[in-house]
Each structure stands twice: as C-alpha cells, then as structure tokens.
Image (tube, rainbow, N blue to C red):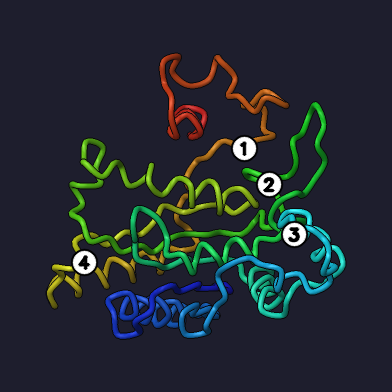
Amino acid sequence: MKVLLVFAHPEPRSLNGALRDVTIKELEAQGHEVRVSDLYADGWKSEIDRADFPSLAQDARLIPVAASKNAFDADTLTDDVKAEIEKLLWADTLILQFPFWWFSMPAILKGWVERVFAYGFAYGVGEHSDKRWGDRYGEGTLAGKRAMLIVTAGGWEAHYSSRGVNGPIDDLLFPINHGILYYPGYEVLPPFVAYSVDRLDEVGFVSVAESLRERMRTLGSTRPISYRQQNGGDYLIPSMQLRPELGEAAATGFALHLQDEIAAD
C-alpha cells in the first residue's frame, strides 16, 4: 500500500513528532511505502492569494473558486500545489495528523486543504442534473482510496464523549471526515485520537504508541465510517435533503448522514 502522511505540528520533538515516527516505522514494517508532507518543516504557504494563480491577469478580480478552476484546467497551479496533488493521486491511503487546536486542525493544514483541493480536482467534478449533483460525498476523483485522521487532544476522553462539555469527538471531526475527506470520494476510517496528551507520561506514551501501531497494522482492513452516498438514492436532488422516510423522524444533526445500522449491515 502507498501511504501519504500529511503532518502538521511545528515541533518535531513533540508528542505528535514521536507518534509520526511510530506511524512511519510501523507502516514500513508492514511493507507499505510511505511519503510524508511535513507542512511546517516545508514552510508550506497556507493562505490563498493572487500568487497561487500566476496566469490570472493583474487587473482581473480574484475569485478563488473560478481562479482555481481555470488554473487547474490550464495546468498553471503553482509547483508546490501540483506536487501535493501528485502525491494524493499516488497514494492509496491519506493520513492527516495534527493537534486538535481550538476545535479544529491547525491553520497550516486547513490552508493545505484549501490550496491543494483545487476546483476540478477535489470538487466541481461530474454532472449536475435532476439525477446527480456532481461526483461528491462517496464519489469523485479520490474514490477508491482510504483516509483517516491521527489527532492529539489536550482534554480528557470524557470531555469529548456524548455528554461531554466539548461535544462528541465524532461530531467535532465531522467537518473534516465528511466535509473534506468523504466529499472528494475517500473511504474514511474512524479516527485515531489520543487524549490528555499534555499529561501523558512515559507509561502512557507506550500505551498510546501500541494502540497506534495496531491501527496501522489494520489500515487496509478497518471498516470505513458508513456515511451515506449523495447519489445513492438517500437524498432528494437537487434539494439534497435526506429522504423523509430515512432516519428517525425527530433526528437532526450529523448522525443523520450515517447509514441506518440495518442497511449498513
């Protein structure tokens, strides 16, 4: 298996750095080929601006979506973005690793997504009609590939539980898992989350590292999160509303976009 690990932490001697090394070593021990995009070490440019679209006329108004589409179609995206797209096409599996800062990914990783997931590559793909609404949410350029998150959080696991004050971790990560990874077609694996990392001692690290090794050993066999496919019949097109007969009548929120357990089995 070919694995791309996108790493977003500014300190290589951090817990994240140590877990990254555990991940790479275990994957390579299993015979997988690993490439790493270390965003801080590479000096990744996170913001989108005119410099991303060198073919855009100087007097033209910058509309990022349109500029992204034109640059992708004309093969004029910047070299750093092209290199990351090539890695995504190369990899069978994408891993995003980051600390959970202010309930999301670090800005540098969000910027990586915004610049690399270009229009025509990760979105804006496929026909839009009364039967389909583009190739997305289970379909798209990256369909057939797998993706997962490796996340470190300072809070206790209980803080991220169904009744925890921070909110359920699956809900907090939904915008990334569903909105960034599932959207262009990835099969999204359950995330690996290490909690209370600011209080982690040597014994705790050994336990977390072994759990991570086990996830890497089962990377190819772990069952993906059972998100509903957009064009699979569960949604009304073009309103993109879940059909009224699906899910519990009073239910709302992210869980609606998981397949019913009976259907999933």
Residue denoted by label 1: 229
Q: Is residue 156 above or below residue 247?
A: below
Label number found at residue 215: none
**Which residue is found at the position 35% from the left and 84% from the top?**
12
- Amino acid type for the residue under numbered disc 3: Leu
Q: Are marks 1 and 2 in contact (CB under 8 Å)?
A: yes
**Which residue is found at the position 49% from the left and 50% from the top?**
177
Give the CA distance from mark 3 to mark 1.
33 Å
Q: Secondary structure at mark 1?
A: loop
Q: Nearer the viewer, mark 4 or mark 2?
A: 4
Residue denoted by label 4: 197
**Which residue is found at the position 67% from the left and 24% from the top?**
239
Decide if residue 200 is on the left or right side of residue 66.
Answer: left
Give the CA distance from mark 4 to mark 2.
35 Å
Q: Are marks 3 and 2 in contact (CB under 8 Å)?
A: no
- Amino acid type for the residue under numbered disc 1: Gln
For marks 3 and 1 on the same chain, the one whose residue lies earlier in the sequence = 3
Decide if residue 150 is on the left or right side of residue 226.
Answer: left
Label number found at residue 62: 3
Image spot of residue 231 (x, y percent): 69, 34
Closest to the observer, 102 or 123: 102
For marks 4 and 3 on the same chain, the one whose residue lies earlier in the sequence = 3
Residue 231 seen from this side: yes
Residue denoted by label 2: 139
Dot 3 surroundings within 10 Å: few (below 14), some, or many (20 or more)?
some
Dot 4 surroundings within 10 Å: few (below 14), some, or many (20 or more)?
some
Decide if residue 43 is on the left or right side of residue 78.
Answer: left
Q: Are marks 4 and 1 in contact (CB under 8 Å)?
A: no
Give the CA distance from mark 1 to mark 2.
8 Å
